[in-house]
Image: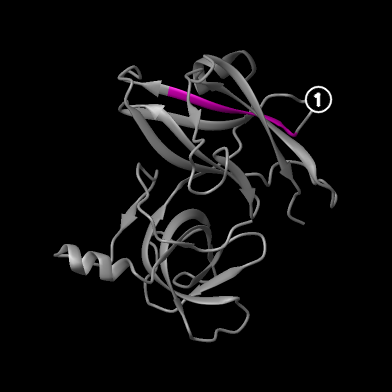
Amino acid sequence: MKTLKTFMLLFGILLGSTTFYSCLDTDDSYSEFWKDKKQAIVTVKPLTDNTYYMQLNDSITLFPTNSYVPENLKEIRAYVILRESDKVVSDYDKAVEVIRMDTLLTKEIAPDLGAENDSYYGTDMLALSGASNWFPGGAWIEDGYVTFDFLVNKGEKHFLNLVQTNSADPYELEFRHRAENGDYTYQPLPGLVSFKLDKLPSTEGKTVKLKIKYKSFAINDYRTIELDYKSKE
């Protein structure tokens, strides 16, 4: 769906751990440092306990040439800042140097709890970013994950889940938000979250519409978006 992007500041939060690889002392060094960098959202794919590659989208793979290994290496979505390398790596599309990696909150589809859905998963509002740097509308599917670029009101804790609530249509889901310790500061807090879609039934090579309902700030009511979805086989 997307290629590597030239670097621009990403405002907001990434819901995971953060690793920096550089200390920049001056504005000049800052500008020079970012000159040849690119940013992307990827899936980290472990090969062994201390080696991995990254899936950029449904077709392009990236192999890190430097020694950085994420802590507690596992398959997870991540925001990365990269420098493309001239090195040739067999079996992968591009060689890259990882400059920074922020892991995203990455979850499975949550079970339907019936009458307890509202109390457990919440009914608090959120917004999908219309000005998303990643995809128009703030929601997209790639590599078997749906990712949301969203905003919530600032609060201490936010629980986010993707719930399968319609047994008659397995491709109808709800993006749920439960805020705790107050969610009414009216100060937008941006974030990114990904959900793995492997629990959905196979689309058998066809592209179907994945319907996702969420409670929207914009209309103070529920809104449904539709995304094209083809399962990984």
The secondary structure that dominates the magenta segment is strand
Residue at horizontal 33 percent and vertical 20 percent from the top: 186
Name the kind of residue labelled 1 in the image: Ala
Nearest the viewer among 26 and 116 is 26
Does the stretch in magenta take in 62? no
Q: Position of residue 64 (x, y in %)?
A: 46, 74
Report the span colored magenta.
171-178
Q: Is residue 210 left or right of residue 188?
A: right
Nearest the viewer among 96 and 6 is 6
Crowdedness near tag 1: few (<14), some (14–19) or many (≥20) residues, C-alpha within 10 Å: few
Q: Position of residue 101 (x, y in %)?
A: 38, 60
Q: Is residue 170 left or right of residue 16?
A: right
Q: Is residue 158 left or right of residue 181?
A: right
Does the stretch in magenta take in 177? yes
Q: Is residue 48 left or right of residue 15?
A: right
Total marks placed: 1
Compared to residue 154, the image places residue 202 above or below, namely below
Q: Position of residue 63 (x, y in %)?
A: 51, 74
- Quadrant where the image shows the N terminus: bottom right
- Quadrant where the image shows the C terminus: bottom right
Compared to residue 8, the image places residue 217 above or below, namely above
Residue at horizontal 34 percent and vertical 17 percent from the top: 184
Residue at horizontal 45 percent and vertical 23 percent from the top: 178
Q: Position of residue 230 (x, y in %)?
A: 76, 48
Q: Which residue is mark 1?
A: 168
